[in-house]
Each structure stands twice: as C-alpha cells, then as structure tokens.
Amino acid sequence: MKHTGWKAGLLALALCLMLLTGACAAAEDVDLSALSDAQLTALYDRAAAEIVSRGIRRTATLPKGTYIAGEDLPAGRYVFTCLATGDDWGNVTVYSERGSGKQLLWEVVAAPEDGEEPETFMVTLNEGDALRSGVPFSLTVYTGALFR
C-alpha cells in the first residue's frame, strides 16, 4: 500500500477552505428581512453581547438615564466617558438587582474645563445591574490598556 498522507492532507485542506469560503459567503447573504421583529431584536442583542464578550472595541453614545445590563446593554466591562458640556454635571451610579440592590459605584462627573480631556473611568456591569447617569455619556467596550 502506498503512503498518500500528503494527498489526503491536501484534500482535507482544500475541503476546509471550500467550507469556510461558503460559510463566510452564506453569512453575508443572510436575508434579515425574513426575520420577525422579535427574531431580529434577539439576533441584535446576541451580536452585541458577543462583541462585548470578545472584547471588540466598540463605543455607544447614550443620553442620561437608567440602563439595565442584559436588557438595555450587554453585561461587561466598559470605559465610561462623561459627555457633559458647559456647566453640566451629574452623578453616575451602578446598583445591583435592577437598581434596588447594593450600590456598586458612585462618581460625580462634570463637563471638562477648556483644554481638558473628559472624565473617564472603568465600570463593570453584571447581568441585572442598573447604570444611572445624570449626564450624556459613552461606553466603550474595555479591551485592555488604552494608550493615547
């Protein structure tokens, strides 16, 4: 019997490449219009959660208000940036149990003075935590040290 291991390996590699190419093309050709509103929203939530869990650096700009991790935004680690302007200032808090539990974070933030960078800090949001911000802000998925 002849040794044909390299041929089998080459054939397997070619087969894998064909499958991967087909999978990538299939992902681009997904007909999202065929999904119901509930299915599309669920897919969007799953994609957002996967982006956070992989640490893909993305930023969301949000108005002041209350946001529940796992409902309004994915649970995860973020860099909070205060987007207050003029004389604006406010409190930023995180509470467990949808806002009725233990206070996990409390910061006072204000608009930057001329020439200053906006205030930033780390925030970790676990499933069900409530983030309350009295100023507009951005959340950037934490991907490690931020060098400027």
Image (spheres, rainbow, N blue to C red):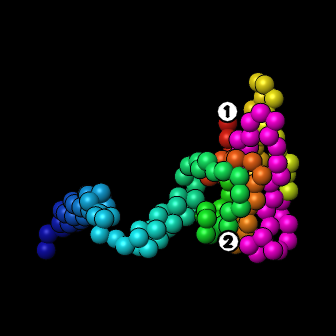
Left or right of residue 63: residue 37: left
Which residue carries the number 2 mark? 127
Q: Secondary structure at mark 1?
A: loop
Which residue carries the number 1 mark? 148
Quadrant location, the N terminus: bottom left
Residue 144 position, x and y percent, is 66, 48
Vertical side of 38 occupied by 117: above or below: above
Left or right of residue 54: residue 92: right
The answer for how far apart the CA atoms under marks 2 and 1 are is 31 Å
Residue 113 position, x and y percent, is 81, 29
* Residue sitting farthest toward the front: 87
Vertical side of 36 occupied by 83: above or below: above
Vertical side of 9 occupied by 63: above or below: above
Total of numbered circles in the picture? 2
Question: Does residue 139 appear anywhere in the picture?
Answer: no
| Amino acid residing under circle 1 | Arg
Q: Residue at x 49, y 68 (%)?
A: 46
Q: In front: 15, or 27?
A: 27
Image quadrant assignment for residue 86: top right
Left or right of residue 132: residue 12: left
How would you rate the neighbour count of disc 2 (Cα within 10 Å): few for under 14, some for 14-19, many for 20 or more? some
Residue 120 position, x and y percent, is 75, 43
Q: Disc 2 or 1, which lies upstream in sequence?
A: 2
Stretch of the chain drawn in magenta: 79-105
Question: Does residue 72 appear anywhere in the picture?
Answer: yes
Q: Secondary structure at mark 2?
A: loop
Q: Residue at x 66, y 66 (%)?
A: 69
Q: Residue at x 51, y 66 (%)?
A: 45
| Amino acid residing under circle 2 | Glu
